[in-house]
Amino acid sequence: MRLRGFAAQAYRHLVKNLELANVCAAGTFGCLFSFSRITSAGRAIDTGAPFLTYYLVNTPSGWQLAESRVKRTTATCMLFATGKFILVGVKTRRISEIDEVLEPVVDDLRRVGYEPKLECRIQNIIFRTSLPFKLDISLLRGARIRGLTYEPIRRLRHGGTAGFSGARYRSQVLPHSSVLVFASGKLVYVGIRGDTIEKAVGEAKTLSREVVTRLPLKKMAMLN
């Protein structure tokens, strides 16, 4: 279906303003870890590798992991004793560069006697974009739109707030993908997957098209 009028203009703005925000990957190094060989509790350890610093972290759920912050990048690699890892904070135009981000971690593991065999795949690609106007999110309250959840800020009994002032739209076309819509006119696309940036951008464009055809943006637009 060809977009026309307001929907076409909104779609062009969303695509024009698309920005890669984060790439999350996961995988395994193919070996079990003893964290005492990598780091020690309570303090950062510089192992001599030029781009790495390790921290030992105890999570609320009882998991213990070594967090490797790759210097001179925005990336953080979380290593588990099972050999599995999660890589977050990657900002790259090429998905293939993720292996390059992990190279210092692989080199560091070899320094302390491991022989890692890297296996990695993309779990989540996040884009952000925006419209040239603010949105009256309250108009979505009670809207019967499949996949839409209205999420107003909730006041807590002992003060403070919870949640965010916006809405979540779960894609009816792309499994696992969702759009967070904010009153400011900003949108965040989560759950996108693809082994190339071209495929990921294509999915982001598909989500943009869904947003302008499924949500009443023209009615919500605060143009004054």
Image (cartoon, grey):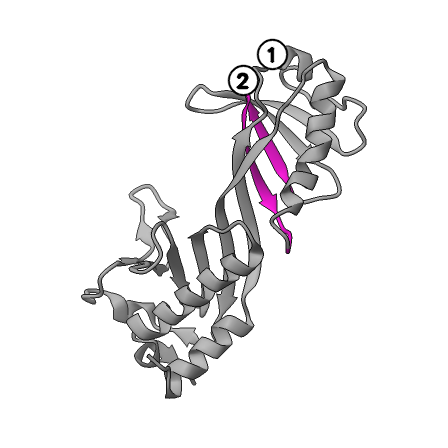
Task: In the rendered view, tell whether residue 223 sits above or below residue 29.
Answer: below
Task: In the rendered view, tell whether residue 32 sits above or below residue 24.
Answer: above
Percent of width and height locating residue 159: 36, 45
Q: Is residue 92 magenta?
A: yes
Q: CA distance from mark 1 to mark 2?
A: 7 Å
Q: Which residue is mark 1?
A: 34
Looking at the image, tell me whether mark 1 or mark 2 is earlier in sequence order.
1
Is residue 169 toward the left or the right of residue 192 in the image?
Answer: left
Q: Which residue is mark 2?
A: 81
Which region of the structure is painted magenta? Answer: 75-93
Mark 2 neighbour density, 10 Å: few (under 14) some (14–19) many (20 or more): some
Residue under the point 59% across and 15% down? 33
Inspect the image, locate mark 2, and give the three-letter code of the amino acid beneath it. Ala
- Secondary element at image label 2: loop
Q: Front-most of 222 and 86?
A: 86
Inspect the image, locate mark 1, and give the three-letter code of the amino acid beneath it. Ser
Residue 215 in view in this figure? no
